[in-house]
Structures are given as structure tokens and as C-alpha cells.
Image (tube, rainbow, N blue to C red):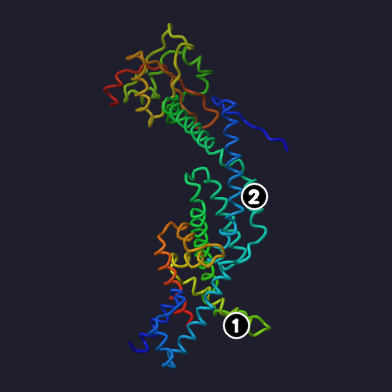
Amino acid sequence: MQELVLIQPGRTLQEQTVREAERLDSHGEFEARLVDCGPLAYRVAQGVLHNKADAEDVAQEALLRAYRKFDRLRDRARFRAWLVRIVYRLALDRLRSSKRRERRETSGTFPEPRPTAPTAEDLAASTEFRARLERAMDELPEKLRLVLLLAAMQGYTLEEVSGILGIPMGTVKSRLFFARKQLAEKLR
Amino acid sequence: MNCRQYQKRILDAFAAGEATFPDALVGHNRSCRACRAYWESQASLFCSIDAGVKAIANEEVPRSLAPGVRALLNDELPSPSSWMSAWEVAAVAAAILAVSFGSVLYRPVRHTVSPNDRVPAHSVESPVAVMRRPAVDARPSPSRELKRTGARAFGHSAEISAAAMPEVIVLPEERAAFARFVADTPEQGVVLAVTRAAPSNEDVPFQIAVLEIHEFGSSVA
């Protein structure tokens, strides 16, 4: 397909070329960050939504939003933190809307029992525990939940979590402590 | 400390992820079966929580994630460089709106009249013919309406040519704006206008009167 370039009046070809080159540079840089941070975006979304399709949707939307505003991000080193905030906010919005929908659809009916794995007992037990854990995590305050998720991700130290979220290390530790304690109390 | 306080410390120690526990706690556990059982249950619970949270936080990333984002990006390229273009488009749209608004403010306006104001079809052949007729002041006309705002119909004058006359159709509700327009014109005092009644149906011809409009400044303001 032939690509047509419209040269706007009052703008020289040189300026146009420079802008195009900047755009390509920006696009290349974003591509690198997509490869680097795509999994992080997906896992944050998955940690909130517990649904692969929804998590992928939300991660893609967050990455697209990040791309649109990438040129406006002054400190590129903060990209990861910025992306985490976008994806976490989008995931929470999606979760809330799906819960509202679920409430509407199930209002007036009895809840159906959760399906359990048909075979191995240990698998059934782990599935059940995971479902309880997900529910308990959903009930955690947002700040605690995000720290818990990021700290549990492979390859992220508490220092990095502190850097991503832009909060002191002590705050990360205390949030992690309260998150784990609340989970234990809910799952007891 | 009693067992309850010990158990609270055990819970806090596990929640904090401490690798070592205070000697007092360890000593109490050796001697207290209930606290030892609590310790073991908490150790198992936190082990399960850690494993579960790790599994949730490290879900396998679908292979379609990055290609999906690239496809979405390709759909909307060249988005980053088009921000200025978008602003420029907005500026052009704003300019067009401003020009349109300006033209609406100073556009010729139409004047609607009652059925009584209409001239019989046989009396008018065309606007030019009407302008060459004697004055239309014997009948109620748009010019009479305009008198209230300072406009006065006057008779046909031979020296006024049709080509030289500005044609203005004034709606009653737009007289104020028209008056401002007249007040702003360089030739203060006399403005010639042709009024044209909007027919209610296609068969009724236009009525045209030659007007002199004066004293707008005092009568309208």
C-alpha cells in the first residue's frame, strides 16, 4: 500500500522529515517498552481481574493508552510506574463494571455452586483455595493489593516495587505486612 | 504474655515474613501445645498464601498480547505525530465557526408579514417592477412594521436605481441586530433597503418596498 504524506501549509519538508523521524524513534522506543513491560501490564490486570481474556483486553488497552501519551511522558524512566497505574486503574474499572453486571444478572436468583475439579482431590483443594484467595485479595484495599501483587511477581524486588509505585521502602513493607495479615485473617 | 498475645505475635511474625523468631516465642512454643499447633497452622497458611499469590501474580502471559497491541497501534498510526495536526484541525474548525458566526450576525435577514401585507399577485411581476411602482404606503406593509424601529417607507424615486440599492430582508426579532449593523455603516442617517415578505406559499409573490431607515441609534438602543 502506498503511503501518502500530506505536507501542511507553512511547514517545511525538513520539519516534516524531522517530525517523522522523531515519531519513528518514539515508536521504536515504545516497541522496546512493549516487549519489556507487556507482561507486567498483563499480570497486574490478571491479578485484579482473575480472568485471562479480560486481563489481556485491559493490558492491551493500557498499553495503547500509554502509547498515545508516550510523547508527553517527560521522564521515560517512570514509564513502568506510569503503565502500572494505568493498567491497575483500568482493571479496577473493568472489575467494578463486571461486578455490577453480575449483580444485575443474578439478582433474585440463588447463586450456583462453584464448579470444582472432577478428579484429583488435591487439585480440587488447590482450586478451592485459589478461589478463596482470589476473593480475599479482591476484598483487600487497593493500595495493599497492588503492593502484594507486584512484590509477588518474579523479578521484582521490594526496592523495585518501591520505585515503581513511587513510595518509600518502609511503606512498601508495611503495606505488604498488612496485606498478608488481612489475607491470613480472611482465609483462616 | 499469655497464649493469645503469643499467637498475635506469631501471626505478625509470619505476616512480616520474618525468617527468624524471637527466642521468647520459640521457647513458649516448645512448652505450649496450643501455640505450637497455631504456629504450624499459620506456617501452612502463609505458605499457601505465598504460593497462591505468586501463582496469581505470575500468570503466563498470552502470546497474543504484544501482537494485539501492535495491531491496535497499526490501526491508529500515526497517532503520536498527529496530535499537532488534530490541534490544527481544531483551530481551523474554530476559525470556520467564528467566520460563520460573524456572517450570521451581519447577514441579510428576512421579514415575515401577515397575510394582509401581501400584494395581490397581479400587481407584482418581479422585484424590479415593484421598485418602479409608486409608493406602497397606502397599505399595511413591512415598512409600517419597521417604522416602530425607526424605518420609514418612502415613495419611489426615479434617481434610485435598483442596482444601487442594498437589499435587506429584516425579521422583526432581528431588528436590533440590523439596527446595530446600520449604525456601524459609514453612511449614517440614510440607509436604503428593500424588504421582502416571506410568502406562506409558493403562489404569493414577493412584496418589495423601498425604505429609508433613520434614527436607529436613539430608537433601538
**Label for residue B43?**
none
Q: In the figure, residue A38 lies in which quadrant?
A: bottom right
Residue farthest to the top?
A: B159
Residue drawn at the location 52% of the way across and 21% of the way down:
B122
Residue farthest to the right?
A: A1
What amino acid is labelled 1 in the image? Ala
Residue drawn at the location 55% of the way across and 65% of the way down:
A153
Residue at the spot of label 1: A125
The residues tagged by marks 2 and 1 sit, at their Cα atoms, a distance apart of 40 Å
Q: In the figure, residue A57 lies in which quadrant?
A: bottom right
* Residue B110 located left or right of residue A114: left
Q: Nearer the viewer, residue A1 or B11?
A: B11
Task: Sort mark 1 into few (<14), some (14-19) or many (20+) by Cα contacts within 10 Å.
Answer: few
Q: Nearer the viewer, residue B101 or A54?
A: A54
The correct choice, above or below, for B152 with respect to A122 in the image is: above
Q: Which chain letter matches label 1?
A: A
Residue A164 coordinates in the image, percent (x, y): 48, 57
Q: Nearer the viewer, residue B24 or B123?
A: B24
Residue B210 coordinates in the image, percent (x, y): 41, 16
> What element does badge 2 sit on?
helix
Residue at the spot of label 2: B70
The correct choice, above or below, for B120 with respect to A164 in the image is: above
Pointers 2 and 1 in contact (C-beta within 8 Å): no
Q: Which chain letter matches label 2?
A: B
> What element does badge 1 sit on?
helix
Q: Nearer the viewer, residue B82 or B28?
A: B28
Task: Sort mark 2 into few (<14), some (14-19) or many (20+) by Cα contacts within 10 Å.
Answer: some
What amino acid is labelled 2 in the image? Arg
Residue farthest to the left?
A: B218
Residue A188 coordinates in the image, percent (x, y): 47, 83
Quadrant in the picture for the C terminus of chain B: top left
